[in-house]
Amino acid sequence: MANERHTDQREWDIDFSTRQSIHAVTKYSPFREATSTTASTLFTPAQGEIAVNWVTNPRVESTTISMYTATGSAISRDTGQQAVGAASLLVNPTNSDAGEGFYWDSPTIPFSVHPQYLSVQVEVRGASASGSVKLDLRDATGATIHATSGSHDLTTGFVQLTASYGVPGSTDPATYRLYVVSAAQHNINWYNDKIMFEVREDTTAVSTYVDGASGIGYAWTGTANESTSIKKRGMTTIKGMKIVNESSTGAEIVYVAIGTTATSSTGIPVGAGETFEPNIQLGFTDYISVLSGSGTPTIRGVIWGV
């Protein structure tokens, strides 16, 4: 917004409807951190990214790996290397040709009159820093490549590969395949983790990796590590908070401010050993700032909201 005037004041505060005002609290953000005599932001409401991962064992935590199909290779669950969790999918190419690795078949992408955007991603790590791999998004037969990451030279650290494809509007329902295969013939084993397939209609961007064990706001849609997963929107309105000043030193007062930088005059003082927990319903969409009057007292608590 630009060129604001005082007549815009009705837009500066939210006038909640009855429905909004009685909305149950559905989100929380716990914290425990040290403060300082320099103001810092404790929490900022933000919708964040909303995303879905259709791969049902994306971090290879489940011992069932039948959702992945070997092609010109042997594949297995391996706990020797991992980008996340305790395991990854190990590929042992047969060294007969390029294109050896594995693929994953998507569910049917339904008909839509609007374009649909498919994105795939994986993190790969070589058993040694040689050999090359690529990530492809192909048709149901594997013959047509719709999108590719291009050739990637393996390293001894995990590296993310991505590719995306726009399905034209009014395309017949179809399935697609995510391939991770050797870009040239070689016999170097490699590990695969954080495997994701997403369908969107709002953007061509590749989402940040999602699985149900990634933290607050993430969830499996069924059995953990054997179902699809989602990332819900973030907290956009603060409805309540609890802040405990853990210090026992009297001078270590913590000042809490909302929507402005905390100072000793703008902040709500929370004395050493005290708790700030409003007993009225809040409705803030701005950040929370904290400042210590002295020292580095630790605060802990939770932010509640929707």
Image (spheres, rainbow, N blue to C red):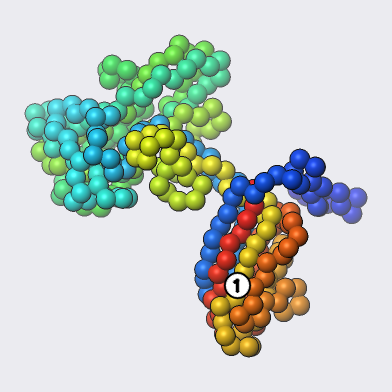
- The crowd level at tag 1 (other Cα within 10 Å; few <14, some 14-19, many 20+) is many
In the image, farthest residue toward the right:
7
Tally of numbered tags: 1
* Residue in view at x 59 percent, y 50 percent: 27
Q: Would residue 261 be visible to someone looking at this image?
A: no
Q: Would residue 268 be visible to someone looking at this image?
A: yes
Residue 205's spot in the image, x, y percent? Answer: 49, 36
Residue 240's spot in the image, x, y percent? Answer: 67, 58
Seen in the image, is 52 located left or right of residue 290? left
Q: Which residue bears the numbered disc 1? A: 244
* Residue in view at x 76 percent, y 77 percent: 265
* Residue in view at x 27 percent, y 50 percent: 86
Seen in the image, is 289 located left or right of residue 66? right
Q: Is residue 161 above or below residue 38?
A: above
The amino acid marked with disc number 1 is Val
The residue closer to the viewer here, 264 or 298, is 298
Secondary structure of the residue carrying numbered label 1: strand
Write down the quadrant of residue 147 in the picture. Answer: top left
* Residue in view at x 44 percent, y 20 percent: 109
Residue 180's spot in the image, x, y percent? Answer: 26, 33
